[in-house]
Image (spheres, grey):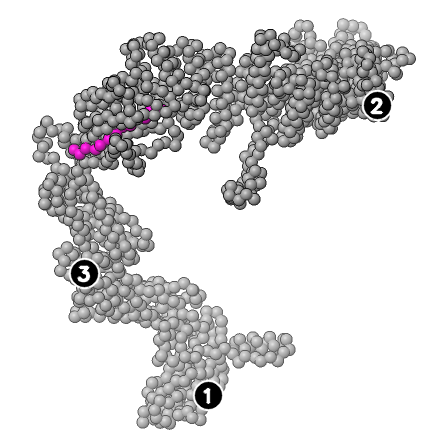
Amino acid sequence: MNSYPPELLAQLAPIMFVAGLDSPATKSQDAFQVLTLRLRDALLAQRKVAIWQPEKTKSFQVVLVDRDVRFPPRKLLPLDDPQYAAAHSPLSPLTPSSPLHPDGLIAPIWIRKHTTLLPSVFVLFLRIFEFPPQASKTLPDLPDVDRDREREQEERKRDTELSAEVALRKKSMSERGIKLTVVLMASRRMLDDPTLDARLTFIRRQSGLDSRAALFVLSPVSAAELNDFVRSLQQALYESAVEYYTAHSKRVRRKRNRHSQAHSSYPGPAAVSGLNIPRPLRPEGWTVRYEYKMACFAEFRSEDEVALKHYQDAYDMLIIMFGSTAILPPRTKRWAEAKVLADCINIKIVKLYLYNNEHALALSHHNTHIRQFGDFSRGWGIGEETFEFWSWVARQHRILAELLDQGVRSALILPVHKPALTSQNLHALNQSTRIPGELDFARSAGINPSHALQHPGFYYYMAARCTEMRRERFQAAIEAELSSQPGNLSPGFANEKKVEHLAIILELYTKAYELFKKYTPASSQTQAQGRLTLWIAYRIAQTYHQSGKFDMAVRFFERIARTYRREKWYSMLPPLLSTWYTCAQQLGDVELSICLLIEMLGHDSVESEDPGSLEEDLLAVLKSAVPATPEDTLVVDLSEAQPIFNSSVILWTPDINVGESSAFQISLTAPTCRSIKSIPFSSLAVYVKDRVSPLIIRHSPSDTDPPLLGVVNLGHITPSNDDDLGGSRTADLRWHPGSTIVFRGTMSSDVPSVLKVTKLALTIEVNTWKVEIPLPPCSSRVQAGHAPRWLSSLDPPKFIPIERENYDFTAITHVPHQLDVSLVHHAPAFLDESYPIVVQVTNTDSRTFDIVVDILLQPTEIDDAVNYIVVDDQQSSGLIKGIQFGVLGPGASGKKTIHLFNSGAGGERMIDVSIQSRPNDSEDETNEDDDNENDLLSDDKTETLRTLVIPTVNPFKVTSDVSYRHKQEPWPGLANLQTFDAKFWDDRRGGEAIASMKFECTGPWNLLLDSVTLEREDNIQAKIIECSTDQDDADMFPAEYLPGDEFRAIYRISLATDEEISEDLILGPGRFVVKWRRNGQDAELDDRLCTTFISLPSLRHPSDGLVALLNVPPVATLHDPITLSLIIRNYHPSRSANIAVQLEPDTLDGFIVAGLRSGHIPVLLPGAEEKLLWRLIPVECGHVRIPRLKIFNKRAAIVAAQGSDQSGSNADIPSGEVVRVVNVGHDRGCSVDVGPAGGEDHTILVLP
């Protein structure tokens, strides 16, 4: 930005003149001198002159002045001159002495006048007079009244003088409309003086100061309090400053309006074009002038939007003026001033857009400015073919970069241009490559980089590129001048000769490089940004090379080439290497020159380059120079560079055994676009993995030219024999462009290893030079690589493509061990038994092996499964390691038995068996000469894996059947004290459960049952009364059960429930214990008994409310009376019952009944029972039906009747809830709610 006047670029802020704070000549500890110094520092630190200041704080740009400072005159004539009204400002184009006369627009001095010569607020610091406090002690004869009168007179005199000084300054301020504020400095003692307010009022009135923010009093305070005072002072005066600049804007707007109405009085350019007189400023110029002034005054007021509008109007009018060469003739003084003004206004507009975070508009205006003035420049004769044009474009980009750099350091946030794609948009974007109708979306998903505001480094880079174009155009002008064809040399050509273009380019590229590094995120997804940073570094290196700083260029080239090689940007390396080689020549670095020439051999030559030029340069360097240390070998590292040869190493067999041979081929193909036939390769070294000495193939020249495809037989190679590898083979090591030499042979090894060629190395020997070029065994000059091929025939040439992935090595292993492994068992296995598995290993090899077995029981996903294995004395639920089988000679066998224990649920169990064998070398332990061989044999280990899946089933299929019945014994009374005993077993509501459990043998094997017993586990809700297994029957067990045989156990349980009936199940009060074993002739079977635990099923709580138990004799004798009893029980825990009983005899009944026919029984309380009796005399023989009984609970009917009475309706009222009648002889159902309902038939067998 140094190319433009700083006044036209700086951010404008209200100006405050501060007087009365002159710096003391000598430093002292006086409080007011310290206060003065602190005030100067605090005021000057409020706001600095800067280009980027977006903060909208109420602060001033402070200028320290003298008390008698004078302002510049508004007009040249004095105020009392009669011509004063018609006079103009000294800077007006209408004033002959003005630098803008007659057609100038705006001079920087106008901005300087309003920023350094004219304030909006004037602050005057004065010291108020204070009478010495101890002055009266020198005159002891004066009374106190006289001393006070003398003090008042002296203070009034001094206050009058101070008021006169302030009034004089007030008058000069009022003429300009400038706010005057006075700050009186007083001591802290003065602040407590009761006469201070009166004195201040006198001073304000006498001096004519305003009543608002015009008079302040300040005493010596701390630095923090002083800063608060300065901020409050600025806030109090800020509104006055805004009014001052608003008045200026109104005055300029009135002038603009008057001038726009009278613009037709100006003569046109044709009227004065024939006269050699200065033309006055045209109406367009006046418009630019007034709009620019109003923009500046709006900027003083911090009204950015208003300032932007006026700047845009001024800029648009300037564009109109530049469009006519009659208004602004090119290459004139006013044209240059207007061009500078247009550039500065463009910077102001861009800056105001950025203040408002309107990045797109800021960049658009910047681009439009360059495009419009680029079009104008072509008409002015300074287009793209001139250095002036590129100098101007570079300046615009640099100014934008500096502006953005300042903004980012402040608070500007650059936009992020990463598109946000949803899943649907991303799918549409992927489909857009196939659907032409969606191409518009694919375009909209991206962004044009020239339309996106980027970080400052990009614009520094653009400025550097434009400066390079400027240098090229300048050099073209220099050549034209030297060739005596200067043509049209511009007026600035002489000044351009003084410009150090390369220094400017280096500065711009360096700034761009630093900023690109700063704004490059450390992410793998932004490698493009990092590569652009390297490209800028490459331009820096090129510039250093052009400026003759070859050492600096080499340092940059080294760093750039390292990254280009690693990321395989081989297309960008040739120009870099060429320039780097030039720098090495200039520096006289012979070894670097040799390395660069050899690396350049790996890159194809361009069309204009001789394919043999690098070969000739390399030979010339080797022959013309000598190494610094002839005994050392110069190694050229091409590990990351593009290789010179297409090389491949193929081993035919992927794996072989010890002592077997594998064929190999090593092929080297020369480049087709480079000539290397004259390079004196002296030898080729082949390095084999894990071996010290390489195989050396020395050059042996032949009389004939080498063929395009040559074969060199290397014979058999034993890598374990270093002496054999050190032996020399010979071959003609010359390659024509595109020719191939295939080195073939066989390799073997006596120990397990990997046959692999790790490195190839070509050696060049010329004079005293010995240069080694390491080559990768498998490499390609093209990034896509080349498919490996095996040469099967030389004449005619035939190749076999190799499809194996790892074709460059062969694995050599020991001869596999021959073992026969068998796993013997009898599936399926039963739960709860010790299941034997026999592992038998037989040595079918001719060698003796030491056998060790590991057994792993895989975890299972079966719920509640507990599994473990036992071998010998080792037990584990997972892995048993290191089971010794001992030493097995040829034909010998060994076996171990694994016992698998399973519990829980059936399913599959998985066991992995690992048999590890290694040769037994115990016979050779005493032979010290075979120690190395024994070490190798210790690695000869073979692992044989077997996996065994064992199905596991339950030995018994268990089914249970449970039925419930009511308690037939009478209930104890409600007041029976025995029921309140904690040990009382209350089974009134629970009744009894009669259950049976059936055991069925489901497995395929016979079982020997030893015993079946019931373990009682009584709880608070259930207890076992009796069980069929309690009987001691010696003939029943032990017994053999075949598959499908069954065994049943019956047991009776008493249930006790609380009054509150729970929905939870009752836990079974015990479990059956079955002891058994598998019955078979297998010797491996364990004779120990297996134990299976079978829990009793859970029981349910009874859910009866009311129930009637009918006791009917099953048999009767004709004409003999019998008794019929009915017990009605209320099982409900809290609700009483209102019971009605009806006996419905029929004429067809075979009984004479004596007893209740219809009636109610007393209210049946919860937990109570009522017993009714009838006497029946049978009068018929056979199965005779007894009279029907119906039991009703009238409780619900009574509630319904009460409700109907209240509502007045006569709806049908239910007769009541029917109570279930249960015949106690048939009371044994599957659940508690099953039984004959009331009214069903019950019969008695009547005998004669």
Q: Position of residue 49 (x, y in %)?
A: 67, 18
Q: Amino acid at mark 2?
A: His
Quickly name the residue at label 2: 263
> Which dot, 3 or 2, sits closer to the camera?
2
Q: Position of residue 1020 (x, y in %)?
A: 36, 63
Quickly name the residue at label 1: 1144
Gap between marks 2 and 1, in whole Å? 130 Å
Q: Quadrant of residue 186?
A: top right
- Residue under the image location 28 percent in, 34 percent down: 798
Q: Earlier in the sequence, mark 2 or mark 1?
A: 2
Task: Give yes or no for residue 660 being in the magenta stretch.
Answer: yes
Q: Earlier in the sequence, mark 3 or mark 1?
A: 3
Q: Tell me if 910 is positioned left or right of 976 in this view.
A: left
Quickly name the residue at label 3: 1078
Q: Tell me if 885 is positioned left or right of 1244 in this view.
A: left
Q: Is residue 185 visible?
A: no
The residue positioned farthest toward the right in the image shown? 82
Q: Quadrant of residue 76?
A: top right
* Helix, strand or loop at mark 3: strand
Q: Earlier in the sequence, mark 3 or mark 2?
A: 2
> Which of 75 and 876 lies nearest the eye of the viewer?
75
* Helix, strand or loop at mark 1: strand
Q: Amino acid at mark 1?
A: Glu
Task: Give yes or no for residue 379 being in the magenta stretch.
Answer: no
Q: Is residue 334 visible?
A: yes
> Which of 912 and 1208 lies nearest the eye of the viewer?
912
Q: Which residues are magenta?
A: 659-671
Q: Position of residue 612 (x, y in %)?
A: 38, 18
Q: Amino acid at mark 3?
A: Arg
Q: Position of residue 227 (x, y in %)?
A: 66, 20
- Residue under the image location 33 percent in, 34 percent down: 787
Gap between marks 3 and 1, in whole Å? 65 Å
